[in-house]
Image (cartoon, rainbow, N blue to C red):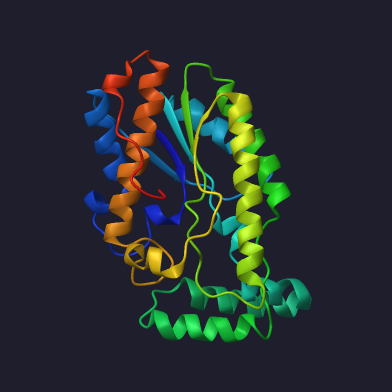
Amino acid sequence: MLRLANSNDRALDLPEHQRSWKIAEMALSEAIGEPVETVVREIWPSDQLPDLIETWIQRYEPDLVFFKVNAYWTGYESVPLRIERRLGRFGKRLGKVGKDVADRPVGDAGAFKLGRLVLLRTVGGDTYFTTDYVLKLMEACLRRIIAHEEIVVTVEGSSGRTSGAYGWGGLERRRRGQERMYAGMQRMCREMRIAFDGSGTVMAEREQAHMRGADSLHRGVEGQREQGLNQGAQMARAWLAAHGASGANAAPGRTSDG
């Protein structure tokens, strides 16, 4: 299995067996009765991504590709990114300092979120990519994958989790963006006959608090477990459907947002 996912697969200090990708691998293996080996690759939107994915397919010859569409790309409003874009070369240096701080392990997630909220409501933040760009890129990537007809493909959209603090109007922008991304990916996958799972809504903070890790952004142990089980079930359904398995042998449905 080629897993095209995000930083949740490496973030925080978690052992391999508690990672969502490993839990998904074990769940899939149990459901289909075959051993599964996962190749994990973290993806980031760029014009070169379709070619990069093609290179990985040629190298690893996967039977199944799991493709994660990350809400962070279009939903996370970054203060360092806004500074970098607004102030040119000087802003790029300032933005790098801010990003380096944001990427470090957070000792006090509450203080970090409060500081970020203040900056978002004064300086403001920019998203990394537009929804239109990501949808167009995802279509190019998926068409490259399904050109290999022997590969089973399954796509996971955003679970609808929020991404920490927001500036003025940020949560409403996040909701609209989530709806557009979900609708676009759902339509795209339906046209390509690809299994798709995701959410068109944004979860409330209280609904997701138990899933977060120490940095208040990535999933902790419970969140990784929940995500891994859902992803394993999703992949098993796609695999069994592609190989003519009966409904009686199908994996159980989702238990939550994924």
Percent from the top left, x then y, of residue 27? 26, 36
Left or right, residue 82 beside residue 54: right
* Residue 48 in sight from this viewpoint: no
Which quarter of the image is occupied by the N terminus?
A: top left
Front in this rendered view, residue 35 or 158? 158
* Residue 102 in sight from this viewpoint: yes
Percent from the top left, x then y, of residue 75? 60, 61
Left or right, residue 235 beside residue 95: left
Q: Which residue appears at 36% of the width and 41% of the height?
A: 254
Percent from the top left, x then y, of residue 162? 50, 64
Left or right, residue 108 beside residue 149: left
Left or right, residue 60 beside residue 95: left
Front in this rendered view, residue 248 or 193? 248
In the rendered image, the vertical position of residue 144 relative to residue 103, given as above or below: above
Q: Quadrant of residue 242?
A: top left
Q: Which residue appears at 71% of the width and 78% of the height?
A: 91
Front in this rendered view, residue 72 or 188? 188
Q: Quadrant of residue 8?
A: bottom left
In the rendered image, the vertical position of residue 233 relative to residue 127, given as above or below: above
Q: Which residue appears at 56% of the width and 50% of the height?
A: 200
Q: Which residue appears at 71% of the width and 55% of the height?
A: 130
Q: What residue occupies the far top of the structure in this picture? A: 244
Percent from the top left, x then y, of residue 81? 66, 71
Question: How many marks are shown on the rendered structure?
Answer: 0
